[in-house]
Image (cartoon, rainbow, N blue to C red):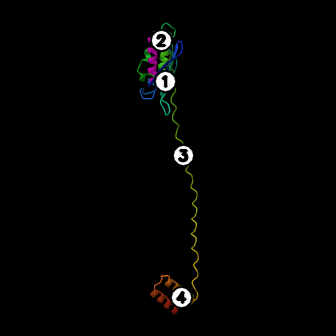
Amino acid sequence: MGTGLSQSSPDTYRLSRVDGVGQYPDAAAMQAAIVDEANAFARSQGKVAVPIAAHAETMRTGHLLTADYEFRLAPAGDAAAPAAEAGAQSASRPAEAQTPVAAVAAAAGTTPVAPVAPVAPVAPVTPVAPVTPVAAVAPVAPVAPAAKPEAPHSLYDELVMLDDLRKRGILTDAEFQALKTKLLAGK
């Protein structure tokens, strides 16, 4: 996606690349590509690229795939030049055949240091024993309905109550007469 060659001093350059569109499968492929580009630039100047530093960052949330390669241009007869020329040949290998560390080491004519093994994922946390539920609270006993007025004790009170029920339409006249007869008979 983005490519940038910048000069930081008369013979020192930095080549940077950012890939947010998936042009490269990984940081190693991108790093190998910019090493090749640096070597091609050096050849176009009649010199060789001598690596100074390299950095690549893989794509992750919030960050694009990036690679930086800092190098200096040296005359072909410079003491570092044979190593750089040898590195230029090995750096042009397919990207999947070398890592960024190997590409820089090859370009510098040194033996690459083995990359650090990735950190193993952290084991999932064992859940704590389930929390014991709080003992259920016994339901509150329902409140007894308001006490009913005591039944009338006198025959008169019972007859008045029956008459009131008839007047409200709760009892028919026939029901009222039947209950009244029953009360008067003492049953």
Against 183, residue 100 (above or below) is above
Q: Amino acid at mark 4?
A: Leu
- Magenta includes 39? yes
Which mark sits nearer the N-terminus, 4 or 1?
1
Mark 3 crowdedness (10 Å alpha carbons): few <14, some 14-19, many ≥20: few
Which mark sits nearer the N-terminus, 3 or 2?
2
* Image marks 3 and 2: residues in contact by CB distance under 8 Å: no
Against 118, residue 107 (above or below) is above
Q: Amino acid at mark 1?
A: Ala
Q: Amino acid at mark 2?
A: Val
Q: Main secondary structure of the magenta part?
A: helix
Which mark sits nearer the N-terminus, 4 or 3?
3
Instruction: Give the CA distance from mark 4 to mark 3.
Output: 75 Å
Instruction: Give the CA distance from mark 1 to mark 2.
Output: 20 Å
Q: Nearer the viewer, residue 98 or 174?
A: 174
Give the label on residue 67, or none.
1
**Residue wearing tag 4:** 159
- Magenta includes 156? no
Extreme-front residue of the structure: 167
Q: Amino acid at mark 3?
A: Pro
Give the label on residue 127, or none.
3
